[in-house]
Amino acid sequence: MIKLTFLALATAGTLSFCDNAEQRADKHFQSGLELLEKGDVDRALVEFRNVFQLNGQHREARLQYADAVRARGNIGEAYGQYLRLVEQYPDSLAGQRALAELALRENNWEEARRHGRAAAELDPDDRLVQAVNATVSYRDAVVAKDATAERAAVTKAQALVAEDPDLMIARQVIITDLMRAQNWTAALSAIDAALAESPDDQELYTIRLGVLNQLGETREIRAQLEEMITRFPEDPSIPATLVRWYISQGDVDAAEAFLKTRADQEPRDPDDIITYIRFLSEVRSLETAKVELDRIIASDPPERERLIALRAGFRFDLGERDAAIAEMEELIDAMEPSDERRSIMVMLARMLEVTDNQVGARALVEQVLEEDKNQVDAMKLRAGWLIESDRVDEAIVTLRAALGQAPNDAGAMSLMAHAHERAGNRDLMADMLSRAVDASRNAPEESLRYASHLISQGDLRTAETVLINALRLSPNHIAMLRGLGDIYVRDRDWPRLTQVIETLRREDGANAQRVANDLTARQLAAQDREDELMGFLDTLAGEGASGMGAAALIVRTHLAQGNLDAALQYAREILDANPGDPEARFLVASVQVAGGDIEAAETTFRDLATENPQDQRFWLALYNIHALQEDVATARQALLDGLEANPDNLRLNWALAGVLEREGDIQGAIDIYERLYAADSNNLIIANNLASLLATGSEDADSLTRAHEIARRLRDRDVPAFQDTYGWIAFRRGDLDTALAALEPAAASLPADPTVQYHLARTYVALKRDADALAQFRKVVEAAENGPELAFMDEVKGEIDRLSASVE
């Protein structure tokens, strides 16, 4: 009886406590609603957080909180709150609807599909949900190249717009489809109709600029940019785009006058001043910009410290690095914590990174983020470091937060594309590269990056469009002209290629002429105009040292035609015209190797290496000539001598790693590749080789995990060596379906490589495909027949015996 009484009292107390907690939670909730009504969002959010402390399952408070932070533009936090809401209450239409819409905005197609379907099950008649699902269906149809499904999705979007003209998601499907069909006039009409409903939609204005570009409406581009500057005064990329437009029209003075007027107008805006000064530094000179900046600083402008920091940046670029860093440190020490001080700290972090003070740079960035976790430039720096460290998933989270704060930041989008590439998500990478082009309004760097990806995928038409759009605003950009010329060479579009070459010829500067010469030579070669090609190259070769590349190409052409005597005679004529020239001597020695005069060539290579120890080519030539004679020790010594003079040289280290791998010193090879990877983790071949060695040379779990992290970027790449590496790592991780999908094409492309054949054979065994495994192991034996003894051959022979008994 005593125990039962005690239990009754305890239970009553617990229930009373729960009632009180829920009552207090409701009180905080009602207070939060009242504060929202008054527009006091900060205090309302505090009240909602109090609700969660008392009742983490409060459905209405969670939704109100998510809606409030979303309205403030904090998309990352809003997404997390909506996600928690639907995890607790899967039947929350508002939560599923919001998640579908936000995921669509971030091009997170899987999440948009998941939440769109969930929302449709809750309310199939909701028009916004239908619009999200129509967009996902359209994208899926484009990827699958399903024209019927594409048309069905567009028809659905058109019906939704007819029912609800405010439905911008549905309008976007219509606009995108018209642009993909290159129906620019209709696309412009559709954009204008959308702007009539949503006149402050900046993304629509950006898309409209691209369409005007396609239509060649030069004057209207200027008018729209001027309107956008007035309508979106906080966006610094719009004035920058207008400046590029002025320059594209050949009116640099007008661009300068426009920026100077903005910099001098009252009230003075530091961002306008900085834009003006940076323009001077790029178009005039660093010294001109520094002089003008000194004048402005003397006039006591607002945020003077930022301008002093900018001046320190110019000093840094002019070579006064220590003085510039000292000035920045002194400036920061004299300031109180503020947004301005944090921006200057990030500038200093970039300087320290350039001077290889990684520890100092990272410490500054962490300090900035400790003070303000949403400082976008600091988040971008951190994300870049995370990517380089293969902590890609963390980088993506960081960049999503950065884009939540600055949704039109092209730099953050480019970093996100890089992160997706490292993760092996090339579709997401392409989406983000495309968005970066739009956000930057066809800026050269972003356009080149996206065009390069499109060219690698064989999508020459879209790449051409991207580059032409960018060249309309930057018509003399050499790298973009080179990219466009490359497309026309591939397409054999000689009239357009000739236009590009003529544009380059009109440009001053050696780089433009080099690109024009290269494109001309490629055109003549592709058209089989051999006599004209040789004459053109001979003319270039007559320009002395600057023509050595052309001379080398003539020599290679003679050798390719089997005309050794002509190659040697021409090389000696070049040497006679340039006596003692290292390039000419190297050319003669290279031909001597082809002709079998090894002793003479070796003497020349050794002399050149001794005289020019910093030139990797001469050491590599020595290495190759000894390797050709199977003199392994002397070949290795040539590499070691070269590395003594150039310890960080990529090619020399790379060659030495290959020697060590062939000798069975796998750890030695891994050590070299680790150093190379630390210096350049973006190099795909280095990444592939390191991942391959880690996966094949070590059995421990840590090595396999690291190999997987490095190799993620190799997924879905049509390079047999990459497929083999990725597939073998997948096999070792137990992901047999992924392994098979990668290793089968790799083995088909590399039939003479016994290791690749062995990897596929092991996969067939694991999948219990014994007949396929037996046939594959026999291919291993065939491929290894004339090569060195391989460690796995005893296993191969044993498997053939075992499988023969069971299969045959």
Image: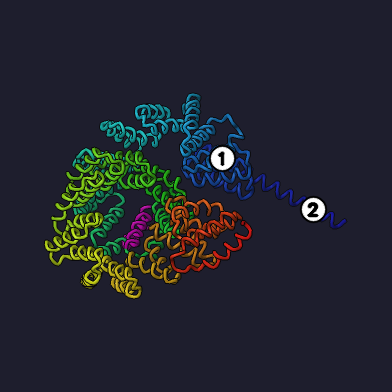
What secondary structure characterizes most of the magenta part? Answer: helix
Please tell me which residue lies in front, 204 or 389.
389
* Local SS, label 1: helix
Q: Position of residue 179 (x, y in %)?
A: 38, 33
**Residue under the point 70% across and 46% down:** 19
Residue 115 circle label: 1
- Name the amino acid type tagged 1: His
Figure quadrant of residue 349: bottom left
Q: What colouring does the structure picture have?
A: rainbow
Eyeballing the image, is 247 above or below 577? above
Residue 123 included in the magenta stretch of the image: no
* Residue named by callout 2: 9
- Number of other residues with Cα within 10 Å of mark 1, as a class: few under 14, some 14 to 19, many 20 or more: many
Eyeballing the image, is 771 above or below 704? above
* Local SS, label 2: helix
Q: Is residue 149 left or right of residue 514?
A: right
Q: Is residue 622 left or right of residue 172?
A: left
Magenta region? 329-354
Please tell me which residue lies in front, 603 or 99.
603
Figure quadrant of residue 195: top left
- Name the amino acid type tagged 2: Leu
Circles 1 and 2, Cβ within 8 Å, touching? The answer is no
Instruction: Indicate the quadrant containing the C terminus: top left, top right, bottom left or bottom right.
Output: bottom right
**Residue under the point 51% across and 47% down:** 77
Eyeballing the image, is 262 above or below 193? below
